Image (tube, helix red, strand yellow):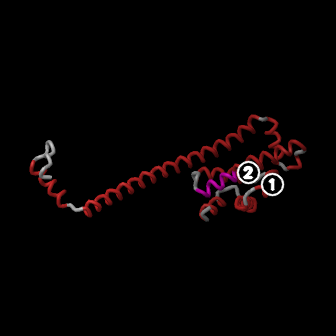
């Protein structure tokens, strides 16, 4: 450091202190400082990745909420725009015996491939904590109300084997308890599902 030119705009006394500390620092001390700075870089990187994961999880949850809203909206719009389907819906709700042929097939398909599949997906999204509790509560009440219909219960009896066992248990509990309130919802939420 004695042969080195002093740094510009640095007082000669400070330059001597800096030079003295570099000359007295051995290779082990430099390695320790390097290791420390490397550790700080790793911690900063992990913090950045954690923040990115949190943001990604929030975005995934928002997408799941929006997906549910779109699915239910599409089902509702289908009923509202298709007069004959709305009429089939009304008759079918009184029981499958009220329908025949193509009308019966459309009603069964509407619930088994549309409504029940949507609610099964939502059930598992809820269990994975990917949707907001308020969204789940609304879905639970909607499904409970639908299951109050004789025709919907009959469809469930015909098609329940098409669905996952856990979702079957959930729907069977709604039917058995004949709940249209939040009581079953609370029991599933407290149970960690």
Question: For residue 124: magenta?
Answer: yes
Residue 164 position, x and y percent, is 72, 58
Q: Residue at x 19, y 56 (%)?
A: 22
Give the alpha-carbon distance from disc 1 to disc 2, as whole Å: 9 Å
**Left or right: residue 123 compared with residue 18:** right
The residue segment tinted magenta is: 119-128
Residue 90: x %, y % from top left: 81, 43
The residue shown at (82%, 45%) is: 107
Q: Main secondary structure of the magenta part?
A: helix
Alpha-carbon neighbours of circle 2 within 10 Å: few (<14), some, or many (≥20)? many
Q: Residue furthest left?
A: 13
Let me know if residue 150 is in the magenta part: no
Of marks 1 and 2, which one's residue comes earlier in the chain?
A: 2
Furthest toward the front, the residue is 3
Q: Quadrant of the C terminus?
A: bottom right
Circle 2 — which element? Answer: helix
Residue 152 x/y as whole percent: 79, 51
Helix, strand or loop at label 1? It is: helix
Which x, y percent locates residue 155?
Answer: 81, 52
* In the displayed structure image, the side of residue 41 where residue 23 appears, left or right: left
Q: Are marks 1 and 2 in contact (CB under 8 Å)?
A: yes
Q: Which residue is mark 2?
A: 116
Q: Is residue 178 visible?
A: no
Q: Which residue is mark 1?
A: 159
């Amino acid at each position: 450091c004695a042969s080195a030119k002093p740094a510009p705009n640095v007082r000669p006394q400070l330059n001597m202190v800096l030079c003295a500390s570099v000359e007295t620092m051995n290779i082990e001390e430099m390695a320790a400082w390097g290791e420390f700075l490397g550790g700080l870089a790793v911690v900063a990187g992990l913090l950045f990745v954690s923040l990115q994961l949190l943001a990604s999880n929030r975005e995934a949850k928002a997408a799941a909420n929006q997906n549910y809203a779109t699915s239910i909206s599409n089902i509702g719009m289908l009923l509202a725009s298709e007069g004959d389907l709305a009429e089939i819906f009304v008759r079918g709700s009184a029981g499958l015996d009220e329908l025949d042929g193509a009308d019966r097939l459309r009603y069964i398909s509407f619930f088994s491939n549309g409504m029940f599949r949507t609610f099964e997906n939502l059930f598992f999204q809820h269990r994975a904590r990917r949707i907001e509790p308020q969204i789940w509560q609304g879905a639970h009440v909607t499904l409970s109300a639908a299951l109050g219909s004789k025709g919907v219960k009959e469809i469930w009896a015909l098609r329940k084997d098409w669905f996952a066992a856990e979702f079957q248990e959930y729907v069977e509990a709604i039917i058995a308890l004949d709940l249209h309130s939040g009581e079953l919802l609370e029991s599933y939420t407290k149970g960690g599902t």
